[in-house]
Image (spheres, grey):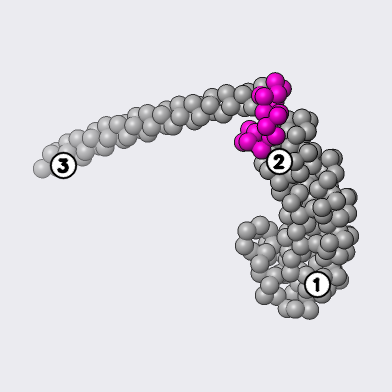
Amino acid sequence: MLTQEQQKFLADDTLHDNTKNWKNLHWVRKQWLTNRDFALASVQKNGMAIKYFDETFRDDPEIALIAVKQDGRALHYLSDRLRDDKTIGKTAVQENGIAFVYLSDQLQNDEELVSIAVNNNGKVLANVKPQFKANKDIAYLAVKNDMEAFQFVAPELQNDPDIMKEFNRQKVAQENQKQYRSLDTKMGYKQDSLRSIKDKIIAIKQQKDDDVVTFKKD
């Protein structure tokens, strides 16, 4: 059961920001960090909050699963035992492929988890074992997710027709996207220029009208 003070702390959205606000946990009362209910409520809002809790909770499967489901990178702060748990590891890399680097050595040799990770973030291919960089299915998934992953594909696969086709398809799509953005920018400049001219015409007309009114008064 959470106290009113704890509820107020969590309701204040202090844990939503993934870059800085969750660090506020470092300043809360120490006894809160040994409270299981508070730990559960905190990681539901931001998985990375697990970093500040008692080691007991970082080895708690229920809390750990909630944490990595919210932010896969929370895997980094779990116990060695839980980083070797496939269910937790799979949930983590599904949420964020980067979490792959925090898996146990044993799980980093699991082809299913490698596939899920690179399908979520192609650049993770840089961190997988050599045998997976030379695995066509995994290499293809990585390149399909991010064409920049091609540089991490094993040399013997870099001329593979399917992988090359996907790489070239994305390269063309990227070039087209750049052209569209450039066109949109140019059109934006033209529209801004037209608006500027229109505003000037209106201003000149208004000045003339004001001059006429002033002349009549005189």
Q: Given contact means CB atoms under 8 Å apart, are the residues at marks 2 and 3 in contact? A: no
Q: Disc 1 on helix, strand or loop?
A: loop
Task: Identify the main secondary structure in magenta.
Answer: helix
Front of the two marks 3 and 1: 1
- Disc nearer the start of the sequence (3/1): 1
Magenta stretch in the rendered image: 145-164
83 horizontally vs 173: left or right: right
On the rendered image, what quadrant is the N terminus found in?
bottom right
**What whole-number distance in Å separates the C-alpha atoms at marks 3 and 1?**
79 Å
**44 on left or right of 146:** right
Q: Quadrant of residue 215?
A: top left
Q: Which mark is residue 214?
A: 3
Task: Report which residue position mark 1 lands on.
Answer: 54
User: Image quarter for residue 123?
Assistant: top right
On residue 166, which mark appears? none
Residue flagged by tag 1: what amino acid is it? Asp
Sequence-wise, the earlier of marks 2 and 1 is: 1
The residue positioned 78% from the left and 30% from the top of the image is: 137
Type of amino acid at the residue the image marks with label 3: Thr
Circle 2: residue type? Leu
Whole-Å distance between the Cαs marked 2 and 1?
33 Å
Tell me what residue is drawn at x 63 percent, y 36 percent.
151
| Residue that protrudes farthest toward the front in the picture | 156
- The residue that mark 2 highlights is 125
Q: Position of residue 200 (x, y in %)?
A: 27, 35
Quadrant placement of the C terminus: top left
Task: Point out the frontmost of discs 2 and 3.
Answer: 2
| Front-most of residues 34 and 199 | 34
Number of marks in picture:
3
Determine if residue 77 is in view.
yes
Q: Residue furthest left?
A: 218
The residue nearer to you, when weighing 218 against 208, is 208
